[in-house]
Each structure stands twice: as C-alpha cells, then as structure tokens.
Image: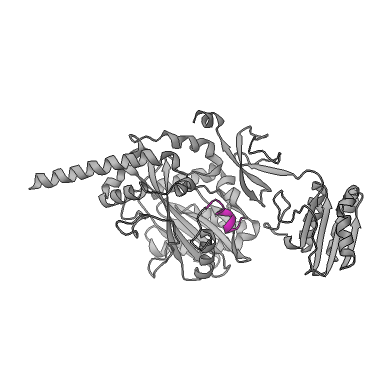
Amino acid sequence: MVYNSPVLFDQSETLVEKFTVRDDRRKFLIISAQPKEADAIQPFINEVNSQKEYELIEMNDELQINNISEVLNRQKMGTQLYISAKWDDAVTIFTAAIEAGFSEDEIQTLISGEKRRYVYCLKCYHLQEVEPVETDTICHHCQISLEIGPFFSIERKGYIGYPYNPAFVSAN
Amino acid sequence: MYKSTNLDLFPYPFRTIKEGTNYRYSNDLRKLEKGQMNCVKITPEYEKQIKRKRELLHEQPEVRFQSYPHTMEMQWEVAEMLINMAVEDYPEHFQIEKNGNHWTFHNLILNETESFIFGDSSSIELEPLDLIGRHFTTDFVLMVVRDDNLYLEVAQESYAALFSPHWNKGMSFDEIHGPVPFVSRTGVSLTERVRDFLIRNVLPGEPWTRINWNLMANRWDVNYETFDTWGPTRFLVTPENAGNLVRLRVEEQFFYRMPRSNAVLFVLNTQFLPMEDLTLKPEWLEQTYSILSDIPKPMADYKGFTPFIEPTVEYLKNLVEKVRLQTKGATIGGL
C-alpha cells in the first residue's frame, strides 16, 4: 500500500447499484458479507453461472471478514472482484483487495444500507462523519463552522471542510 | 507584511502581454536560459521575509511543512542544489565547507551556521529541506512522477494562495488543481496540459519558469486553514483604501527535474506590490488597470478576488486619471 492507494469513499468509482458482467475477465470472485441480501445478487449469480468460472464466498462473521486477505491473495490476474456488504465490512474487504493488488477497475462494490461520508476540518484537522446531503456542519472538535467542499483527500480520508464565519456570511 | 521595494527585482506578471490586448489564462511556461537557472534571490526584503517564514514554520509546523518518511534522500538532493546555487550566485552571503560528508553551511547575512553530515538525517534536528529551506525566502514543493502524474511528497510553504501542504499532501497534480475551471477550445483541461508539459519538458539541467499572479486584500497568505479569518477581510476594501490594502501578489515559479530522484521541484518566489506603488511605474499602472477592468468573472472567482475587484478597479481608475493629470500639468509647466 502506498499513500495514494485507492480508498473506499462515497464517490468511489467502484460503487454500483447492481453488479455487471465483465467479459474481459477470466474469473469472477463474489464476496458476500451480507447473506440477508443474497436475493440482491442472486440474479447476477444466475447470469454468470453459465458463462464464467466464479467463486462465491459468503461471510457470516467478523472473524471471516478480517481473514479475507487469504482469499484475495491467492487470486490470479484477470479476476474481477464483486463485494456485497454493509459499509464498514465493504471498507475492510476493499482495503484488503487493494493491498492484494486489485485495481479499482477490477472491483465492483454493492453497498447494503447507508454509505458513510466524512469531512476533514481544516482548522483543527479533525475527521468526522457527516450526513450524505449535508453541505455544511460544525466541527465536533473545535466547534468552527465548516463548508463541505467537493474535494476528497485519500491521505486525510475525508472531504475538505473550509472553516468559515457564519455571522459574517449572514451579514452579507 | 512586506512589499517589494526594488522594482527591478519584482517579477511583474504582465510584461509579455502586448499593449492593447488583455490577460487570458494560458500555458505561459518559459525555458530558463543559461545564466538564469538559479532560483536563489536575495532582495532588500530578505531578512524580513525569512523572519516571517520562520515564525510561521515555528507556530504552525503541521500547516507549513509536510513530507513522507521515504523522502529523505530526495530532500538531501534538493538541499545540496540550493546550497550550490546560493554559494555560486552570492559568495559574499553564503559559504559551504565540505570535509568529506561533514558539511558546514554559512549564512553570512543572518550570521548563522548549519553543520551536518550530508545524507544523514540524524545529524540535524529538522528534515533536510525544512532546515535548508529556512535560509531562503521561497516556498518549495517536491513532486514525484508516477502513473503519468505528479504527486506531492514534500512541501514547505509560507505564502499560500489557496494551497495547504497539510491538505494537499499525497495529492496528484490533477487533484491539487481540481478547482481550476479552465479548459481549452478542444475541451482539454488546462491542468492536464500543464501537467503533461511539465512531465515531458522539465528535464535534468533544463529548468522552466512561469509567473502566476493574484490580488490579496491585506494578507500575507490565504491558506485554507485561515479562510474564516481572511474571507471576511476581502469585503473591507473600498475605492479609498484599496491602494494600501490590495496588493498585486506575484508568484514566480521555477521547475527543476532532480537528476538523481527524478522528482520535480517547484520553487515559488512570492512578491507583493501595493496598488498605490504602481505609480512608481506608470506603464505598469495603466496596464494593470486595463487588465483588471476587463477580467472575466470565472477567473476572478477562481482567484478569489471577486469581493474586492470593483473597488480596486475604481481606485486604479482614479489613480490613472490623477497620474495623467499630473503628467499633463508637468508637460504644460515645462513648455
């Protein structure tokens, strides 16, 4: 892993509404950490079943998820990875996949439930979670008002939070 | 705050713009000719600038200097280049004694000495570029080439213009310039063009330069961290006080390809000229007024001076008229 290795964030190019077949891959690896949502990926499994070699791994507990590197490390070139999980589990699997050498183009991520979004306060360098649609917030650490900008830092793992003076903004 | 007092050393940004035409954002990179490749400059403001730079680095180390641990070798390479440049152009101000790897650098302007084992970071208290950079007024950004892009791995800056070493650390050239809104007629972004140009053309022994400019309202630097402080001050400018409050901020940029590490070093020489001092060069005053009165709004928005461009132009208009009247009066008086 290097400092600019991809991370999973709410605008990651790997996020999809549904899995799609990649004809240019030799194998599909489907990791489902959300067995309750199995119905959501079943049509995709039916579709690939007759076309390509695929491996389905269903994970039921945290221990299995934390040991996912073992599975990812033994994959060969040409494998397309499909992750179906809740946000926190998806982050764990995604990070392990990047560490194992997968590129973003080789990963599709289907999130069950809410995605997480973070803002990085440029006044005190505190990272905090924000709602998906929030455009401004208050820093939980230094209490300054923050305008949430559109720029994301892999290094800081959040969107830019510009400190501003709300009294002044309302006066103008 | 400081301002440039020796206008012969001031990198006036509109020199290459022909009379009657106006400024447009473009790729204005120029190859440095032999004899002009040295980025070390000693101006009358040297001591003032160094004092302020060191204060900022001391007060806000996290904000002003950032690096990755694997960059030490690259930093030594840059430190060596800067020392060589300083000694070469200003032997009366800087000296270096080399006893094997035991080096002693003398700054005679400040009456300071730095002794270290070259290449051994444990022999100094700061990182190599942070230490040597404190003897020069310029800012430094070191970017490495990877995947057809440039990535920021080291930065020391004190005169930011919407830039932050802390925030921009690890970012690609494209990410850092994400806010730049300009595209060419063929739809290629200016950022991509400049990035590719730098990667292809900045070669060892072949440095390039360009001049960037902006307007600042009574500020030394406008970094993201202090937006809550300087953002409101932009609205305090009036046609009456613009001459003193508003400064032409010029950033003379130098780009060097480091021969050992293959990194690209950005050296940024930032100088300020208050609007009222433009009268010292009437041709600069006329041209700056002409350019600012016709500046496209997207450019003013991007550069961040939209809140005070109107009173500034009003001030310059009045000043131009005043200078023209004085000149006319002097001519008539001389007849």
- Where is residue B237 shown, x and y percent of the image? 39, 35
- Where is residue B269 shown, x and y percent of the image? 43, 54
Would residue B242 be seen by someone viewing this image from the given angle? Answer: yes
- Where is residue B128 shown, x and y percent of the image? 56, 57
- Where is residue B264 shown, x and y percent of the image? 54, 64
Q: Residue at x 49, y 65 (%)?
A: B256
Q: Residue at x 37, y 68 (%)?
A: B35
| Majority SS type along the magenta span | loop
The N terminus of chain B: image quadrant: top left
| Residue closer to the observer: B230 or B320 | B320
Q: Residue at x 58, y 67 (%)?
A: B261
Its colouring scheme is one colour
User: Would you say B164 lies left or right of A23 here?
Assistant: left
Instruction: Count the numbered circles shown.
Output: 0
Q: Residue at x 38, y 66 (%)?
A: B36
Image quadrant assignment for residue B236: top left
Would residue B153 be seen by someone viewing this image from the given angle? Answer: no
The part of the chain drawn in magenta is B171-180
User: Would you say B231 lies left or right of B36 here?
Assistant: right
On whether residue B177 falls in the magenta region, the answer is yes
| Residue closer to the observer: B292 or A69 | B292
- Farthest residue to the left: give it: B335
On whether residue B271 falls in the magenta region, the answer is no
| Above-or-below relation of B314 to A11 | above
User: Would you say B321 lies left or right of B173 here?
Assistant: left
| Above-or-below relation of B209 to B229 | below
